[in-house]
Image (tube, rainbow, N blue to C red):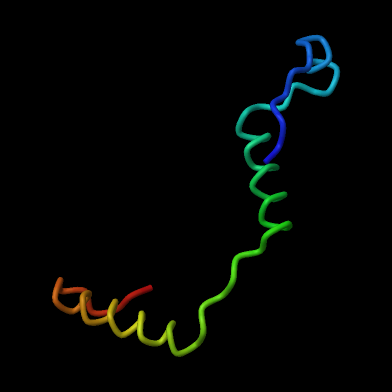
Amino acid sequence: MSKPNRDTYDYWVSLGKKSIADRASEEVERRLKENPPSLLDDDVLQELRKIMDSDAKICGVTCLP
């Protein structure tokens, strides 16, 4: 977990005033690099696809993206 940012306003301005969205995006990228998500096995993906296809048909959807 990163420590809180306690920089002064003037220092923040000198760094280019990143928006909260920019800072959040950078934090997400950093965390994903440090802890990449594990991928599901092919058999699990196939089973999930079958479930989604079945539910889609019940709802009248003929083709999933």
- Residue at the (51%, 78%) spot, across then down: 40
Q: Can you give x and y, in whole percent of width and height, for residue 50 in the image?
A: 30, 85
Q: Quadrant of residue 64?
A: bottom left
- Residue 34 location in percent, x, y? 73, 57
Q: Residue furthest bottom?
A: 43
Horizontal arrangement in the rendering, residue 36 relative to residue 15 (left or right): left
Quadrant that contains the N terminus: top right
Image quadrant in which you'd find residue 36: bottom right
Report the residue at 35% width, 81% height from top: 49
- 6 or 27, which lies in front? 6
- Would you say 38 lies left or right of 58 here? right
Rendered view: 11 above or below 49: above
Question: Could you say which is closer to the camera, residue 1 or residue 20?
Answer: 1
Image spot of residue 37 (x, y percent): 60, 65
Q: Position of residue 62 (x, y in %)?
A: 23, 79
Residue displayed at 45% across by 90% down: 43
Residue beneath the point at 62% across and 28% down: 20
Quarter of the image for the C terminus: give it: bottom left
* Relative to 27, residue 31 above or below: below
Total tally of numbered discs in the picture: 0
Task: Answer with the quarter of the image where residue 8 lies.
Answer: top right
